[in-house]
Image (cartoon, grey):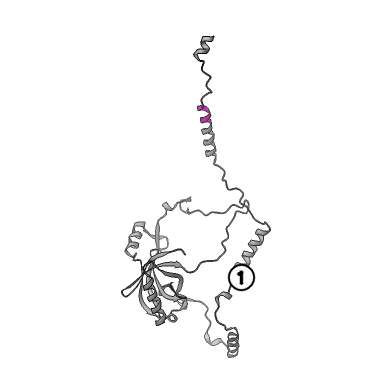
Amino acid sequence: MHTVWKGSISFGLVNIPVKLHAATESKDIKLRQLHKECNTPISYKKVCEGCNKEVTDEDIVKAYEYSKNKFVVLDDEDIENLRKENEDKAVEIIDFVKLEEIDPIYFEKTYFLSPDTTGAKAYALLRKTLEQSGKIGVAKIIIRSKEQLAVVRVYKDTLVMETIHYPDEVRSVSDVPNIPDVNIVVQKELDTALMLVEQLTTVFDPSKYTDEYRTALMELIEEKKANNTVTHTATDKKPLPDNVTDLMAALQASLDKTKKPATRKRTTTKTKKKA
């Protein structure tokens, strides 16, 4: 499992060397875009709208747009210095709370935590402590130069860390339009709905849920492969520009011109005397 981050978990004076691994992965089927005429993959270029020309990564700087078309440019050096100041490779647990106190809207991404070489005992201690207390740890961590809020909890005998949104990143429900009044529900309709919920209530089993669209799409792709309904890119070789062709012709002509003519056999002294 690929390590995405390496550091430590700390709570109080306890320090646990750990590694971070992505706990989830996207299973989306990625589709490429081809040119309909020749089946060549489409590529996207970075183009400056002002100069109307393509730019490279070296030509690009980062900036913050504080109002319409007004920017503060940030040098790479500025960002790097700021990153170094905050690059403490530690998951610092600052509070312990109950999991049910955090609404799922706050959760962002899940990572597995594994102990580093010398961290097995302290790792086991934190795992046991969380299990017996029934609490989870609220922590701060810096990943890719960004400070994030996170929680540390136990999942199937493994410590997991889940990044969570800061409160100001969760939009206010008062901004959601067209929310109906709670008093418009008729009691008879509510009773019927509750009965339906009761009939459909079961124990959560994640293995019973599948992405039917992804399965059907993959089956379609395999069917087309089996029927040899496949498309090949017209050519992998790009045509040489005229100037390159001309250069190759000029080089070949130069080689031909500098070739030495075949040398005749030198007449030996014996041959001359015979004559």
Task: Tell me the residue at 42%/54% (across/down).
Answer: 60
User: Looking at the image, which is closer to me, 84 or 90?
Assistant: 90
> Foreground residue, 202 or 30?
202
- Determine whether 3 is above or below 155 in the image: above
Q: Position of residue 44 (x, y in %)?
A: 52, 54
- The prevailing secondary structure element of the residues shown in magenta is helix
Amino acid beneath label 1: Glu
Mark 1 secondary-structure assignment: helix
- Residue 189 versus residue 254 in the image, above or below: below
Tell me if residue 152 can be seen: yes
Q: Residues within 10 Å of mark 1 (few under 14, many from 20)?
A: few
- Quarter of the rendering containing residue 154: bottom left
- Residue numbers of the magenta segment: 253-258
Q: Residue at point 53% right, 87% down?
A: 183
- Residue under pointer 1: 212
- Horizontal and vertical percent position of residue 185: 56, 87
Q: Is residue 254 magenta?
A: yes
Q: Is residue 10 left or right of residue 242?
A: left
Say if 65 sits above or below 263 in the image: below
Q: In the picture, which quadrant includes the C terminus?
A: top right
Measured as percent of width and height from the top left, residue 43 is found at: 54, 54
Residue 75 visible in the picture: no
